[in-house]
Amino acid sequence: MILTAATTLFDELLETIAQLEQDNISAVNEPFPYLKIANQFMHSLQSLVLAGSFDDQQKEIRFFKTVKPKFRCLQLYYLALQEINFKRPKDGKKILKKFYADEMHKICAFRCYNQQMLNYYYSGSNDMDALLFLRKVDEHPYWLLKLKLDRDERFSTPADHLVAKIMSMDKIQAYLAEEIVKLGGASFGNSTPKLENTKEYKWTGETINLVELAYGLYYTGEINNGNAGIAEIVRLFEKIFNIAIGKPSRRFTEIKQRKRLSKTKYLDQMKTAIDKRIDEDDEFLPKPNFR
């Protein structure tokens, strides 16, 4: 199935990106290696689609609405970082801050120009999916602006590129906002005032469990709109819990090599524990008295 293969391919893409981060190659300062990798995986994704077929229209819609845009989003994000690096002024903090602010204004203009598509995308609507995310459609919603198709129409729909653009704009906006905050004197590490007599927390479980949690947060993009790398998340955990985790990619290999047990043993245990507590609470809910 294309969807299953594409999901596996995206996981491989994220792992490759994580490896670049482990090698201390910064996506912000050196986006080209990341862009090169993203281009290679997009080419593999296209080959996968052209060599196969979707079982039904719903799976085709799902692919072009949620799967392909994740690949394209990374391409557009790294391309935007590369352009920002090329245009970034060297003339001082004030000018640099204005440059970042101007880039933010461009994102605002993009959002205004595509407001109806943004509303549709963020609302989770699906009533017009057949017009937006199927190939070779004869019509599209009147409000869909700036149609963007790939060179091969067998690999494009009226709106999949625009969805990817929206996703990449979110990532670029988060990056620009962080840079502006840094220029204002704050930083990620000291933006929160330190409390006196703050209790120290130490991770007392198995270290590999913390690695599972870190990768779960990384692959779901829950931190900084998905802009936090696996190395950053692991270092954050090390700092919070006073523990040495080591190289994340090596620890992740331990997870992948699990055979007898679930590869996500700890996350499964967390789910079981939460479900058990909910069931226990439900058992003791007072029954309504209708007399």
Image: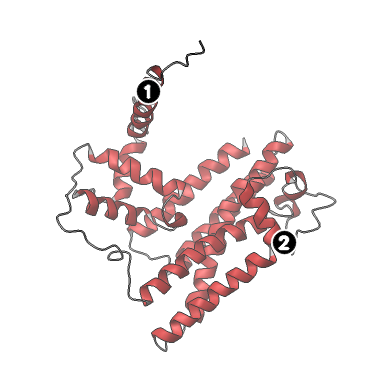
Q: Which residue is mark 1?
A: 281
Residue in front for this viewpoint, 69 or 193: 193
**Of the image marks 2 and 1, the number of the one nearer the N terminus:** 2
Residue in front for this viewpoint, 141 or 37: 141
Residue type, numbered disc 1: Asp
At 16% from the left and 58% from the top, the residue drawn is 196
**Residue 237 screen position, x and y as percent:** 27, 50
At 68% from the left and 63% from the top, the residue drawn is 114
At 74% from the left and 50% from the top, the residue drawn is 132
Q: Quadrant of residue 273?
A: top left
**Residue 225 screen position, x and y as percent:** 47, 56
197 w.r.t. 193: above or below: above
87 w.r.t. 121: above or below: below
Residue in front for this viewpoint, 290 or 48: 290
Left/right of residue 240 with respect to residue 25 in the rendered view: left
Whole-number angstrom distance, CA of label 2 to CA of label 1:
52 Å
- Quarter of the figure that contains the N terminus: top right
- Dot 2: within a 10 Å radius of its alpha carbon, few (fewer than 14), some, or many (20 or more) residues? few
At 37% from the left and 18% from the top, the residue drawn is 284
Left/right of residue 15 with respect to residue 119 in the rendered view: left
Q: Secondary structure at mark 2?
A: loop
Left/right of residue 160 with respect to residue 100 in the rendered view: right
**Residue 64 screen position, x and y as percent:** 66, 47
Task: State the residue lying farthest toward the left.
Answer: 197
Q: Which residue is mark 2?
A: 148
Does residue 29 appear anywhere in the picture? no
57 w.r.t. 27: above or below: above
Residue type, numbered disc 2: Lys
